């Protein structure tokens, strides 16, 4: 059921018991603090965001992190919808998430987005795309939309192929496999700094192919200066913008699909290497598969397939004791 946002700091919707359990598991895996509350299954908090799941079926989200929570966790992971605030940003057709118009006049720019940051198994992939007037129209014609609302891997792969043809090679993909990811995380000690490094690399690579690009839009995941500081000399000459729900932009949406396609391909390859299907996300099912792998090959083998800073990894180690 779609929710209501009275303002950007408060959101309420209806969820069923299964979704309550899914959301609880998702938040616990990511270190949210849980507590009891009258008439509620639970309340959870993280930094400036508070979430309460009432026994009546009502879910409330409150605090300065409300918008990011709804857009990046609740809608794509639990509700499987896209809607929060979108009425103010873009027009969509019956196929949810499809960008159906480009604001005029269209300003050529790059878009960058990532896939895999919330998945225990698999790579982290960051992609960038440059779109000018002609490219933007081509992307709209093929139905580019936020990758989060495209559930079929086959559809993602087909759309990614069309995007690569439509943008005339003006794209870049940076895929960071689990082993490299774990080394980098060991250096950065912070996910947002690692993301900023990956975004900067994707932008720098894009600028080599599309030197006319002087403006880049990224989804907001942390302080804007993180990406700027990670850019090299060429990249520091551009205008870098970050905003929430940036996937409403056609260039960012295209980048999100290219990133998702490479992530799915990476997951398929790692599953073949492991001899087991590696599930996406960070659910109980993911933890059980990780335990199975660790028991078969040893816990150190997980470094080949997974992001070891996740709470899931510690849960696996605890299960093996």
Image: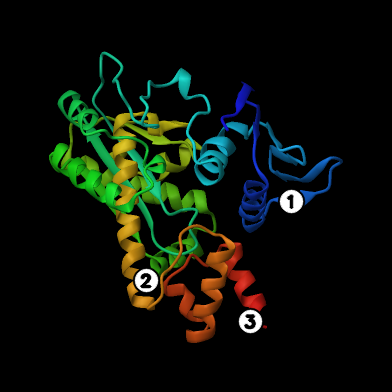
Q: How is the image coloured?
A: rainbow
Which is nearer the N-term, disc 1 or disc 2?
A: 1
Quadrant (top left/top right/bottom left/bottom right) for the C terminus: bottom right
- Quadrant of res 249: top left
Which is nearer the N-term, disc 3 or disc 1?
A: 1
Tell me if label 3 and label 2 are in contact, CB under 8 Å: no
Few, some or many residues within 10 Å of mark 1 (<14, 14–19, 20+) = few
Q: Who is closer to the viewer here, 13 or 109?
A: 13
Q: Secondary structure at mark 1?
A: strand
State the residue lying farthest toward the right: 38
Few, some or many residues within 10 Å of mark 3 (<14, 14–19, 20+) = few
Number of dots carrying numbers:
3
Q: Which mark identifies residue 271?
A: 2
At which x and y percent is residue 265?
A: 30, 60
At which x and y percent is residue 137?
A: 19, 25
Q: Who is closer to the viewer here, 161 or 206?
A: 161
Q: Is residue 224 visible?
A: yes
3D distance between C-alphas at marks 3 and 1: 25 Å
Q: Which residue is mark 3?
A: 320
Q: Nearer the viewer, mark 1 or mark 2?
A: 2
Name the residue rendered at 62%, 70% in the picture. Answer: 314
At which x and y percent is residue 224?
A: 47, 36
Q: Secondary structure at mark 3?
A: helix
Q: Which residue is mark 1?
A: 33
3D distance between C-alphas at marks 1 and 2: 33 Å
Q: Secondary structure at mark 2?
A: helix
């Amino acid at each position: 059921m779609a929710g209501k946002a009275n303002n950007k700091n408060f959101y309420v919707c209806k969820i069923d018991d299964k979704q309550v359990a899914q959301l609880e598991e998702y938040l616990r895996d990511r270190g949210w603090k849980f507590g009891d509350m009258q008439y509620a299954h639970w309340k959870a908090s993280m930094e400036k965001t508070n979430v309460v799941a009432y026994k009546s079926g009502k879910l409330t989200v409150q605090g300065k992190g409300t918008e990011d929570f709804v857009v990046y966790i609740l809608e794509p992971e639990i509700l499987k919808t896209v809607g929060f605030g979108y009425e103010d940003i873009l027009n969509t057709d019956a196929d949810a998430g499809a960008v159906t118009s480009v604001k005029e006049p269209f300003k050529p720019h790059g878009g960058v987005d990532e896939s895999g940051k919330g998945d225990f198994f698999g790579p982290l992939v960051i992609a960038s795309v440059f779109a000018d007037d002609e490219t933007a129209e081509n992307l709209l014609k093929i139905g580019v939309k936020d990758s989060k609302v495209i559930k079929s891997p086959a559809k993602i792969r087909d759309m990614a192929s069309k995007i690569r043809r439509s943008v005339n090679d003006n794209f870049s993909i940076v895929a960071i496999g689990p082993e490299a990811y774990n080394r980098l995380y060991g250096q950065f000690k912070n996910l947002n700094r690692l993301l900023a490094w990956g975004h900067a690399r994707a932008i720098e690579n894009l600028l080599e192919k599309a030197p006319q690009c002087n403006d880049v839009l990224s989804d907001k995941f942390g302080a804007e200066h993180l990406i700027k500081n990670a850019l090299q000399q060429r990249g520091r000459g551009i205008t870098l913008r970050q905003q929430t729900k940036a996937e409403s932009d056609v260039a960012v949406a295209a980048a999100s699909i290219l990133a998702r396609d490479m992530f799915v391909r990476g997951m398929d390859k790692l599953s073949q290497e492991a001899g087991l299907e590696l599930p996406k996300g960070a659910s109980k099912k993911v933890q059980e598969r990780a335990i199975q792998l660790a028991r078969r090959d040893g816990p150190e083998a997980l470094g080949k397939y997974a992001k070891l800073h996740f709470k899931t990894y510690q849960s696996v180690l605890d299960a093996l004791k």
